Image (spheres, rainbow, N blue to C red):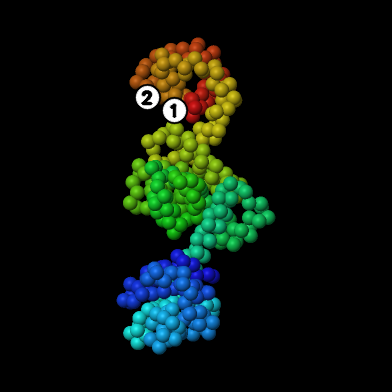
């Protein structure tokens, strides 16, 4: 541990709020690195050097000031000690008898500030490496032989079924991101993916309760409104589905949801399983080949009614009566439209392969 200028300046500012005297902080070589009197910065302090060398309080009175040719000012200098090591010296300028009552208080304050700084640095270190561990876990980059040891080090229980959720902040700022992460860290393991996205690892039992009770908003601070975020819930991690797979399904669910349902704030993989799984297929030559017979249907604005009819047909589980009811048309009109779709595409609803291509087209067309 080394006393730096930032910590030293913090000591000066905090202690000078307690006492009405100028305070100096000297490093392990006796150089003034922070002071209530900026003109004294970077000067060697004789009293501090003696205090460090002999590990004792050095009182500088008027006689000693004269003896040292006025190179110092009257005051008291006390060694700053942390875990038995002298890190530097804190000095209080003024008549020794007047500042003496505050000397130990200032020393204690300085040492508490240093201890607090060390604890904060330790916390930052733990947070940084824990987040790195979670990111590697999500991306399946940890070798299996190292995974158990790393999980044990970070007290991460691999036996607990876990669901990955991704929170996307709308109009994100660094302050908003920090606020959400701080809130989440009190409850869950999480990792920042970008300035606007956070991955959260939720025990699957808790996730199911949140979903059943429609309380996914509890993943965010109470003062956030639903239009400030999007949440995507991945598949539940079990012993045959890895956390990395849950993460990938959450990413794909978010991507699908943003494109297909931009006004919603919650997207759940289990509710959109097939289109989410097809999401990565949408921009491939395979998808282009599948959709080619339907190109004439989807490329013409004159066929919007037929497109809507096809969509509703599958939303109604291919039930003609239910489809005509939902479209507010006669069933014969529905049959006419379906026949027209067959004529335009060259595909037929009574052929299982063609019917499957029709269904995939209604999904892939939304993803493109």
Residue 287 image-quadrant placement: top right
The front one of 173 and 137 is 173
Q: Which residue is mark 1?
A: 315
Residue drawn at point x = 66 percent, y = 52 percent: 144
Tell me: residue 306, above or below residue 23: above
Is label 1 in a helix, a strand or a loop?
A: helix
The CA span between labels 1 and 2 is: 10 Å
Sequence-wise, the earlier of marks 1 and 2 is: 1
Is label 2 in a helix, a strand or a loop?
A: helix
The front one of 256 and 77 is 77
Q: Which residue is mark 2?
A: 326
Tell me: residue 186, above or below residue 361: below
Tell me: residue 43, above or below residue 281: below
Place of residue 198 in the rendered image (x, y in percent of width and height, measured from the top left): 47, 48
Residue 293 image-quadrant placement: top right
> Callout 1: 10 Å neighbours few (<14), some, many (20+)?
some
Asked whether the viewer can see residue 270, the reply is: no
Q: Which mark is residue 166?
A: none
Residue drawn at point x = 53 percent, y = 41 percent: 249
Place of residue 93 in the rendered image (x, y in percent of width and height, measured from the top left): 37, 79
The quarter of the picture where the N terminus appears is bottom right
Asked whether the viewer can see residue 278, the reply is: yes
The front one of 17 and 216 is 17
Residue drawn at point x = 40 percent, y = 54 percent: 179
Q: Could you tell me if the residues under marks 1 and 2 are in contact, i.e. CB atoms within 8 Å? A: yes
Tell me: residue 191, above or below residue 155: above
């Amino acid at each position: 541990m080394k006393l730096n200028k930032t910590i030293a300046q913090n000591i000066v500012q905090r202690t000078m709020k307690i006492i009405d005297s100028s305070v100096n902080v000297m490093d392990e070589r006796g150089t003034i690195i922070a002071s209530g009197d900026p003109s004294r910065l970077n000067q060697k302090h004789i009293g501090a050097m003696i205090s460090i060398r002999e590990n004792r309080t050095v009182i500088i009175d008027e006689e000693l000031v004269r003896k040292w040719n006025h190179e110092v000012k009257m005051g008291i200098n006390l060694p700053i000690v942390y875990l038995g090591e002298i890190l530097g010296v804190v000095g209080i300028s003024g008549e020794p008898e007047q500042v003496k009552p505050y000397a130990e208080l200032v020393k204690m304050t300085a040492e508490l500030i240093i201890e607090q700084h060390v604890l904060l640095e330790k916390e930052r270190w733990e947070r940084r490496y824990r987040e790195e561990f979670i990111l590697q876990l999500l991306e399946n980059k940890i070798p299996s032989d190292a995974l158990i040891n790393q999980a044990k080090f970070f007290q991460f229980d691999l036996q607990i079924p876990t669901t990955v959720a991704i929170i996307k902040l709308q109009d994100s700022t660094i302050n908003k991101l920090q606020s959400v992460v701080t809130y989440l860290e009190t409850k869950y393991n999480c990792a920042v993916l970008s300035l606007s996205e956070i991955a959260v690892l939720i025990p699957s039992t808790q996730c199911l309760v949140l979903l059943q009770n429609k309380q996914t908003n509890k993943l965010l601070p109470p003062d956030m409104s639903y239009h400030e975020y999007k949440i995507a819930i991945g598949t539940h991690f079990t012993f045959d589905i890895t956390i990395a797979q849950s993460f990938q399904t959450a990413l794909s669910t978010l991507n699908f949801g943003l494109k297909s349902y931009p006004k919603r704030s919650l997207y759940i993989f289990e509710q959109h399983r097939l289109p989410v799984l097809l999401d990565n297929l949408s921009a491939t030559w395979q998808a282009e080949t599948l959709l080619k017979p339907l190109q004439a249907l989807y490329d013409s604005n004159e066929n919007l009614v037929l497109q809507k009819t096809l969509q509703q047909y599958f939303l109604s589980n291919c039930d003609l009566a239910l489809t005509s009811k939902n479209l507010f048309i006669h069933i014969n009109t529905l049959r006419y439209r379906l026949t027209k779709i067959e004529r335009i595409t060259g595909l037929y609803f009574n052929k299982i392969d063609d019917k499957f291509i029709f269904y995939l087209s209604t999904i892939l067309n939304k993803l493109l």
